[in-house]
Every structure is written in C-alpha cells, then in structure tokens.
Image (spheres, rainbow, N blue to C red):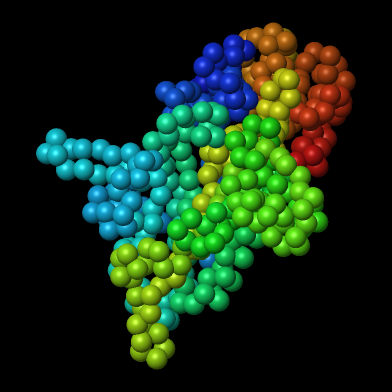
C-alpha cells in the first residue's frame, strides 16, 4: 500500500475529548475516527489490525471444535421476555413506526438457544459449539477508555452445548487453554491471569481473563504461587485468600478484563425448554457454556501495554503491515530504487506500507514511530551510495545497514 493513497491521516494533535492512551494513539495514527462517545469508525490501518486479531481468535476457536455462524444483531423482544432480561439496563431498544419493539444484541443467549433447539434432538448430537464475531451494542452510561468500553464494539462469543456436566467441564478447560493461546499470539499472555469472579445467576464462580494494565478499571488480587487471580468483587467471600492454595499474601493490581467464560448450565435451556433424548430414551435438559472475547477491547489493551512516547509498538502478529518502507529525497534514483524494493516485497508476499509522500525525513520518521509497524526500511542517497538500506526494529533505537541484495532474507529473519 502506498501511503500517499492511504485513507486516514496521521496527526500530532492530541484529541481533546480522549484521555485514554489507546484512543489518543489510534486517532493520531489514523487507525480510527471517533463518531461519538463510545462509537468509532475503523479506518484501513485499524481494520487490518482488527482483522488479524479476529483471525487469530477464529483459528483458536476452530481448533477446539467451534463452528462459525453469524446471528442477527436485531433481536425479538419476546425471546428476551422469555428469559426475563428484556428490561436489563444495558439493553438498547429500537421501535418501528408501527410501534413494534426490538432489542439490539449485547449478548446472544436468547438467539443461540432457540436456534440450537431447532437442530439438536439426540444425545448423539453432543457435544457441539458455535461461535460468531459480531458487532454488539450496550447502553453504557459512561462510555470511556477509548475502545476499551464502548457502546458499539466487536465481540467473539462462543456457546457450547453438552449432555453431561463432565463434558461441559472438559470443554470449559479446553476453552481456557484456547484463550491463553490467543493471548500468547497477540503478545499479552505474560500479563494475563485467569481470574475468579462472581458466577452471578449461573454458578458460584465464573472466570475472567484479566490483563495487568494501569488503565484497567478492575482491581484483582494475584497469587504468585498459583499464577491465578481473584476479582475484588469476590475477594471477601474467599476470606482474602487464593481459592487454590489458601495463600493470603496476594498482590493487588489494576487490570483490564479481556475475556470471560461462564458455565451457563441450564439457565437458558430451561427457559426455552431445550431438551434432548438420551441413550435410554429419556428426556434431559441441555447444559450450556458461554465464552466471550472482544477483539476491539483486545486491540485497545495491546496498545495500552505496548507503546512509548513516540507512538504504538505493534506485536508482529497483528501489525497492520510487517514493513514500513520509507523513501527519503526526490532524487530519481532514490525513487526508482524505492519502487523496485516495494514491488520486490509485494512479490515475496511481505506486507508493506510504502511512504512515497513528498514530506521531510522528520515527518516521515515521526509518522512511522506513531503508526508502529515492526520494521522500518529507509532508502536514501546515503544508503544507496553503499548499495544498502537502513533497517530498524520499532522497539529498538539503533538501525542496521543492510545490502539491498540481502534485504528479503534479513526481513524474513526478523519477522
């Protein structure tokens, strides 16, 4: 992609109405545009990052047997009344000109349960799981923290269906492992803890995945012995101790909730009378689990953890491009060689953003740091005198001079 043609521009003016690091850097870097509080447009750079995060999540959900579907965001009032959740305060509602009301989905149990009931009848159909990556809507009273807490956001929600508690427990553990694989691939596993939280209507406890960050809205207590945590909301119920080993020497931290999983059990299957026939021809109620992970929130969390005074530092796995090719100077030889390198990278399927703009070196370098692509390659009169280019990793200060004929090999080595 040529940067001169890129839709969305960088700016070094800090947005006046944004206090969070993630929102400031995303807007300044040309990744998103704010429409209103809690609602953002994802521009080409931002959409590429989001798409990569979604694909990592998709791959890990596929690996544990999830089948991808796409459910409606516009939902029936009657189904929400069936579960007693129509008047919950986060629900956004719309009314048509003929006075019929609908809900905008903030979660999808009320859709997926009757959907599964249509197709699942026998014990032979279990276990199974379906997931989607879809836009959700929540009536947040205080939309804040950039894309960490919005009124419109992307969510992966997976639902599992089981004939026995033993099988639900098995899948639940597989989902835990899959989540940590996602966090590992996007570079935040070391800062993320499986966290005991309230189970609400469903069970004694649920589990959250909390990522340590100063921007976090949650407070958790970490047991370094077990490498797990407890959410502040239930710490007193556990007598201020680790639920696994009883350790009372817990470390308090601020954290961002990046995922959550629940054993729904029969909460929704009973509401919709969702039963199956077992191997003894007896009717049994279906057991369910729910597993949420927000791609947009994950994107914001990564930025909160991976930045410096100059801008974003994207992990290689989700960066909008792998290489930022920067051409300096108007000399014909520089332009021609830059174009040649650009085409060579494209031919080798290396994702490259080519800064071909008529701007100063200072502007280009500042933009490159702000955007945060992992590798920067600089072509200039000085480098071409040595048949070379400068190559610099975003998180490092020093650059390296590399012969042009060795460039592709070097890039592959660094990526």
Quadrant hosting residue 24: top right
* 387 relative to 184, above or below: above
Residue at image position (61%, 55%) is: 237
Q: Nearer the viewer, residue 44 or 105?
A: 105
Q: Residue furthest left?
A: 98
Tell me if 389 is positioned left or right of 112 in this view: right
Residue at image position (57%, 65%) is: 172
Q: Nearer the viewer, residue 125 or 162?
A: 162
Where residue 190 appears, as percent x and y from the top left, is 75, 47
Quadrant hosting residue 410: top right
Instruction: For the N terminus, give its image quadrant.
Output: top right
Tell me if 109 is positioned left or right of 308 in this view: left
Residue at image position (84%, 24%) is: 397
Q: Nearer the viewer, residue 353 or 68?
A: 68
Q: How many marks?
A: 0
Tell me if 62 is positioned left or right of 122 in this view: right
* 331 relative to 411, above or below: above
Where residue 167 appears, as percent x and y from the top left, is 54, 75
Q: Is residue 344 visible?
A: no
Q: Is residue 264 visible?
A: yes
Instruction: For the C terminus, give its image quadrant.
Output: top right
Where residue 66 appears, as percent x and y from the top left, is 50, 62
* 142 relative to 284, above or below: above
Where residue 197 appears, as percent x and y from the top left, is 58, 53
Q: Nearer the viewer, residue 223 or 333?
A: 223
Residue at image position (35%, 82%) is: 283
* 313 relative to 51, above or below: above
């Amino acid at each position: 992609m040529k940067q001169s043609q890129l839709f969305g521009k960088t700016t070094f003016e800090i947005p006046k109405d944004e206090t969070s690091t993630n929102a400031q850097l995303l807007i300044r870097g040309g990744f998103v545009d704010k429409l209103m509080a809690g609602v953002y447009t994802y521009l080409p750079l931002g959409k590429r990052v989001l798409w990569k995060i979604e694909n990592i999540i998709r791959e890990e959900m596929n690996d544990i047997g999830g089948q991808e579907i796409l459910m409606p965001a516009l939902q029936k009032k009657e189904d929400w009344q069936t579960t007693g959740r129509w008047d919950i305060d986060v629900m956004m509602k719309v009314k048509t000109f003929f006075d019929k009301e609908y809900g905008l989905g903030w979660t999808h149990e009320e859709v997926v349960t009757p959907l599964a009931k249509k197709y699942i009848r026998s014990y032979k159909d279990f276990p199974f799981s379906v997931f989607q990556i879809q836009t959700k809507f929540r009536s947040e009273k205080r939309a804040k923290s950039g894309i960490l807490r919005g009124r419109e956001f992307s969510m992966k929600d997976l639902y599992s269906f089981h004939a026995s508690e033993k099988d639900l427990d098995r899948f639940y553990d597989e989902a835990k492992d899959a989540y940590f694989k996602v966090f590992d691939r996007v570079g935040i596993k070391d800062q993320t803890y499986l966290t005991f939280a309230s189970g609400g209507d469903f069970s004694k406890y649920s589990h959250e995945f909390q990522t340590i960050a100063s921007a976090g809205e949650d407070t958790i207590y970490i047991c370094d012995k077990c490498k797990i945590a407890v959410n502040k909301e239930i710490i007193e119920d556990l007598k201020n101790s680790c639920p696994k080993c009883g350790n009372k020497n817990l470390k308090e931290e601020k954290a961002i909730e990046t995922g959550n999983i629940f054993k729904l059990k029969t909460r929704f299957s009973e509401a919709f009378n969702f039963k199956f026939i077992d191997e003894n021809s007896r009717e049994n109620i279906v057991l369910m689990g729910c597993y949420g992970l927000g791609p947009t929130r994950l994107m914001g969390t990564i930025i909160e953890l991976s930045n410096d005074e100059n801008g974003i530092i994207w992990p290689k796995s989700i960066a909008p491009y792998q290489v930022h090719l920067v051409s300096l100077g108007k000399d014909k030889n520089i332009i021609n060689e830059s174009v040649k390198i650009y085409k060579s990278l494209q031919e080798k399927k290396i994702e490259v953003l080519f800064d071909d703009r008529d701007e100063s070196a200072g502007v280009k370098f500042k933009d490159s740091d702000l955007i945060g692509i992992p590798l920067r390659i600089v072509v200039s009169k000085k480098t071409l005198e040595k048949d070379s280019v400068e190559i610099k990793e975003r998180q490092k200060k020093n650059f390296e001079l590399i012969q042009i004929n060795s460039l592709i090999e070097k890039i592959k080595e660094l990526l």
